[in-house]
């Protein structure tokens, strides 16, 4: 009789003790820090980042474009410890943290060269594949992002505006050559970073042709990937792009937009994306 009445009480007391201990341990380990919740941490450890949304997106992307491999592409701009108030800037330690979290979540890292090979081969990409890109060719990409990519042994693809090479606060020709020789890839972000959909056919042709030509001259290597300035494209721009490039990237992710090798969607990464699950909400 006595033990029968106490049993539920002992179980409840035990459960409370266990909850307090788990909470304290989680707090001690920093899992309950301001922007790193315990539940997202557990979900990330068990399932990978933002699992439900990501699986829905993958399924939807496959339905929309069965002809191309499903891939997650990130678009960074500046990576510097300065420029606190710039939403396009990601701090170097946060950038490194993103890479480590994607590694923990089981992602494989590829570059545009790998994507080109996969697109031409019957072998499909692994389900969790990540391509890291940088737009606009900022000098800080060489100073901060490139050393982290090398240390983490992860490739990066840099979309450069050809008329700005060697200009103030931009990558130099020597830096681009060094990055290329150490496993990075360089793509075109046009000659002048003007919006292609506002131009006539000749102007579009010039931007696509001349940026490719001058980059190839500087690098001594083929340039076959393009990032549309601000991600804008249309039928006329697509047709011209196919003449000079093997693939091209947008600047956003939308489940409603058809994805092909010339409309590859990218998640923009911003200063507020401290952890990778929040990146998948940028669309
Ligand atoms: Zn840009």
Image: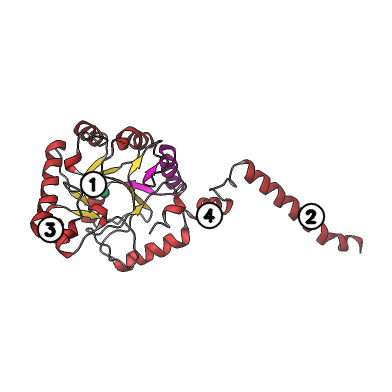
- Segment colored magenta: 88-110
Disc nearer the start of the sequence (2/1): 2
Disc nearer the start of the sequence (3/2): 2
Query: Contact, CB < 8 Å: mark 1 with mark 4?
Result: no
Q: Quadrant of the C terminus?
A: bottom left
Is disc 4's CB within 8 Å of ligand 1? no
Real-space Cα distance between discs 1 and 3?
Answer: 21 Å
115 or 41, which lies in front? Answer: 41
Residue identifier under label 4: 43
Picture mark count? 4
Give the secondary structure at mark 3: helix
Outermost residue on the front side: it is 85
Please tell me how crowded label 1 is: few (under 14), some (14-19), or many (20+) other residues with Cα within 10 Å.
Answer: some
1 or 80, which lies in front? Answer: 80
Please tell me how crowded label 2 is: few (under 14), some (14-19), or many (20+) other residues with Cα within 10 Å.
Answer: few
Residue occupying image coordinates x 21% and y 51%? 226
Real-space Cα distance between discs 3 and 2?
Answer: 70 Å
Residue occupying image coordinates x 52% and y 53%? 46
Query: Contact, CB < 8 Å: mark 2 with mark 4?
Result: no
Residue identifier under label 2: 13
Q: Is residue 109 shown left or right of residue 159? A: right
Disc nearer the start of the sequence (3/4): 4
37 or 191, which lies in front? Answer: 191
Q: Which mark is residue 240?
A: 3
Disc nearer the start of the sequence (2/4): 2
Real-space Cα distance between discs 3 and 4?
Answer: 44 Å
Disc nearer the start of the sequence (1/4): 4
The percent position of residue 269, horizontal first and vertical second, equals 38, 49
The percent position of residue 129, horizontal first and vertical second, equals 35, 52
Residue occupying image coordinates x 34% and y 41%? 78
Real-space Cα distance between discs 2 and 4?
Answer: 27 Å
């Amino acid at each position: 009789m006595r033990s029968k009445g106490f049993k539920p009480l002992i179980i409840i007391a035990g459960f409370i003790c266990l909850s307090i201990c788990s909470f304290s341990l989680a707090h001690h380990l920093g899992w309950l820090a301001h922007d790193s919740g315990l539940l997202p941490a557990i979900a990330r450890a068990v399932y990978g980042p933002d699992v439900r949304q990501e699986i829905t997106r993958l399924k939807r992307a496959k339905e929309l474009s069965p002809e191309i491999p499903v891939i997650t592409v990130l678009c960074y701009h500046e990576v510097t410890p300065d420029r606190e108030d710039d939403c396009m800037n990601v701090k170097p330690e946060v950038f490194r943290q993103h890479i480590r979290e994607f590694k923990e979540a089981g992602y494989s890292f590829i570059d545009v060269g790998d994507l080109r090979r996969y697109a031409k081969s019957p072998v499909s990409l692994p389900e969790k594949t990540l391509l890291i890109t940088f737009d606009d060719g900022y000098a800080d990409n060489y100073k901060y992002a490139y050393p982290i990519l090398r240390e983490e042994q992860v490739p990066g693809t840099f979309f450069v505006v050809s008329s700005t090479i060697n200009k103030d606060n931009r990558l130099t020709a020597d830096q681009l050559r060094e990055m290329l020789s150490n496993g990075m890839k360089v793509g075109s972000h046009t000659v002048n970073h003007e919006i292609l959909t506002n131009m006539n056919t000749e102007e579009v042709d010039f931007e696509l042709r001349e940026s490719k030509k001058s980059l190839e001259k500087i690098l001594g290597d083929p340039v076959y990937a393009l990032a549309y300035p601000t991600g804008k494209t249309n039928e006329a721009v697509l047709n011209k792009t196919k003449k000079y490039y093997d693939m091209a990237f947008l600047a956003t992710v939308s489940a409603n937009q058809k994805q092909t090798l010339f409309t590859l969607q990218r998640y923009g990464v911003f200063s507020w994306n401290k952890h990778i699950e929040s990146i998948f909400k940028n669309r």
